[in-house]
């Protein structure tokens, strides 16, 4: 599997309470027989971050993404992956 993702995070309010993100990603899986990565799929989206705790950097994350063949979804998370 090949995977690439890039995102841009930014603050919306001066105090850092609200932030935003835009992102894009690309991925491809190989055929086990010939190891060719010839079917590249992409996705993109954006979202908001609400700072819950400044000391431990915990955010409530609300993201909407779009993918291949009309796929889309709304995602919620508490915390950060990276």
Image (cartoon, rainbow, N blue to C red):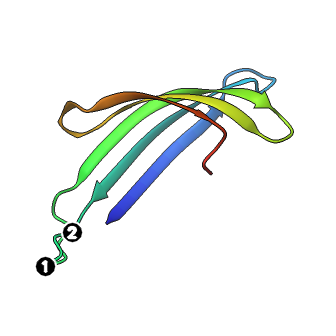
Residue 39 higher or lower than 22, as above or below: below
Q: Residues within 10 Å of mark 1 (few under 14, many from 20)?
A: few
Q: Which residue is mark 1?
A: 34
Location of residue 78 in the rendering, given as x and y in whole percent from the top left corner? 64, 34
Please state which of residues 44 and 59 is positioned toward the viewer in this rendering. Answer: 59
Residue 35 vs residue 7: left or right? left
Residue 49 vs residue 71: left or right? right
Location of residue 35 in the rendering, given as x and y in whole percent from the top left corner? 19, 77
Q: Which residue is mark 2?
A: 30
Residue 54 higher or lower than 74, as above or below: below
Q: What residue is shown at x 40% (from left), y 43% (from top)?
A: 24
Give SS at disc 1: loop
Give SS at disc 2: loop
Residue farthest to the bottom?
34
Location of residue 37 in the rendering, given as x and y in whole percent from the top left corner? 20, 67
Q: What residue is shown at x 81% (from left), y 23% (from top)?
A: 15
- Determine contact: label 2, label 1, CB under 8 Å: yes
Q: CA distance from mark 2 to mark 1?
A: 8 Å
- Split into 4 quadrants, where in the image is the N terminus? bottom left
Instruction: Residue 40: name its quadrant.
Output: bottom left
């Amino acid at each position: 599997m090949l995977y690439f993702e890039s995102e841009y995070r930014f603050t919306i309010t001066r105090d850092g309470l609200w932030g935003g993100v835009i992102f894009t990603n690309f991925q491809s899986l190989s055929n086990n027989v010939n190891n060719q990565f010839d079917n590249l799929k992409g996705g993109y989206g954006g979202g908001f971050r609400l700072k819950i705790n400044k000391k431990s950097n915990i955010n409530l994350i609300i993201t909407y993404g779009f993918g291949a063949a009309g796929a889309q979804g709304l995602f919620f998370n508490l915390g950060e992956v990276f």
